[in-house]
C-alpha cells in the first residue's frame, strides 16, 4: 500500500485543482493500491511563520495549531502531491503559509544535522492551475518554491503540471491535460 499525501492549497474544495488531482490519483491507483490522505489547507487553522528561530534550537515549531497533523502526514507519506492555484504569479496564500511553516524540517536538516528523510525515496508532483492566458513566468516562481519545499521534506520533484487559461478553456474541454494528469499519477507510483 502506497501512502500518497495530497496538500491542496485551493480555497475551492471542488475546484479545478481538486479535479486535476483526482485524475492524478486515478492514474496512481491504476498502478498500485494507494492510501490517500488529503489535506485541505484552506480548512486548516495555520498561523504564519513568526521567524522566532525556535525551531533552530529544538527542530520543532513552537506554534501549536493545525500544522501538527500536517507535519506527521509529511513524515509518513511515501509520495506527495502539492496542488495550488496561481494568483498574481504565485501560489495561493494557504499553500505558502504551510510551506513557510515547514521551516522545522530545514532547521533539523541543516542546523541540527538530523535528516528524518535521509535514504528515503519519495517522489512528488506539483500541480498548478491558473485562470489567465499563458504569459512568461506565470508558473516559474511557484515551481521554484515547490522544488525547494520538496527538497526540505525529502521528496524528489518528478514533475509539474501547470495549466494556464482555465477561465477561457475549462478543464472539461481539455482531455489532453486530463490524460497528462493521469499519466503523472502512474509516474508518481512508478518512481517509488
Image (cartoon, grey):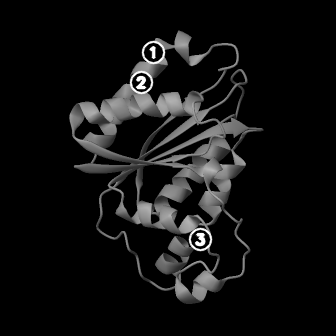
Circle 1/circle 2 CB separation < 8 Å: yes
Q: Mark 1 falls on what kind of element?
A: helix
Circle 1/circle 3 CB separation < 8 Å: no
Task: Please tell me the numbered disc located at residue 180.
Answer: 2
Q: Residue at x 28, y 42 (%)?
A: 189
What is the C-alpha distance between the residues marked 1 and 3?
Answer: 37 Å
The mark tally for this picture is: 3
Q: Residue at x 68, y 23 (%)?
A: 134
Q: Work out which residue is located at the far right of the displayed protein and give it.
A: 88
Q: Residue at x 41, y 81 (%)?
A: 114
What is the x, y in percent for residue 52? 72, 81
**Number of residues whose C-alpha sits closer than 10 Å to that of mark 3, classed few (under 14), some (14–19) or many (20 or more):** many
**Number of residues whose C-alpha sits closer than 10 Å to that of mark 1, classed few (under 14), some (14–19) or many (20 or more):** few
Q: Which residue is mark 1?
A: 176
Nearer-the-camera pick, 156 or 46: 46
What is the C-alpha distance between the residues marked 2 and 3?
Answer: 32 Å
Q: Is residue 93 left or right of residue 62?
A: right
What is the x, y in percent for residue 6? 46, 46
Nearer-the-camera pick, 45 or 9: 45
Q: Is residue 106 left or right of residue 29?
A: right
Q: Which residue is mark 3?
A: 103
Give the mark nearest the N terminus, 2 or 3. 3
**Number of residues whose C-alpha sits closer than 10 Å to that of mark 2, classed few (under 14), some (14–19) or many (20 or more):** some
What is the x, y in percent for residue 150? 48, 56
| Above or below: residue 14 compared with residue 65 | above
Q: Is residue 152 visible?
A: no
What is the C-alpha distance between the residues marked 1 and 2?
Answer: 6 Å
Q: Mark 2 falls on what kind of element?
A: helix
Amino acid at each position: 500500500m502506497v501512502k500518497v499525501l495530497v496538500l491542496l492549497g485551493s480555497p475551492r474544495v471542488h475546484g479545478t485543482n481538486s479535479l486535476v488531482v483526482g485524475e492524478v490519483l486515478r492514474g496512481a491507483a491504476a498502478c498500485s493500491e494507494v492510501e490517500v490522505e488529503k489535506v485541505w489547507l484552506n480548512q486548516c487553522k495555520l498561523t504564519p511563520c513568526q521567524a522566532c528561530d525556535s525551531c533552530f534550537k529544538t527542530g520543532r515549531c513552537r506554534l501549536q495549531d493545525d500544522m501538527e497533523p500536517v507535519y506527521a502526514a509529511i513524515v509518513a507519506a511515501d509520495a506527495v502531491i502539492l496542488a495550488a492555484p496561481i494568483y498574481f504569479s504565485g501560489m495561493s496564500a494557504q499553500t505558502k503559509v504551510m510551506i513557510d511553516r515547514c521551516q522545522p524540517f530545514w532547521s533539523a536538516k541543516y542546523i541540527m544535522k538530523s535528516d528524518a528523510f535521509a535514504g528515503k525515496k519519495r517522489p512528488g508532483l506539483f500541480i498548478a492551475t491558473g485562470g489567465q492566458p499563458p504569459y512568461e513566468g506565470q508558473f516559474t516562481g511557484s515551481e521554484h518554491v515547490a522544488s525547494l519545499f520538496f527538497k526540505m521534506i525529502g521528496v524528489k520533484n518528478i514533475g509539474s503540471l501547470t495549466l494556464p487559461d482555465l477561465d477561457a478553456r475549462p478543464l472539461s474541454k481539455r482531455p489532453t491535460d486530463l490524460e497528462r494528469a493521469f499519466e503523472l499519477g502512474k509516474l508518481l507510483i512508478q518512481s517509488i
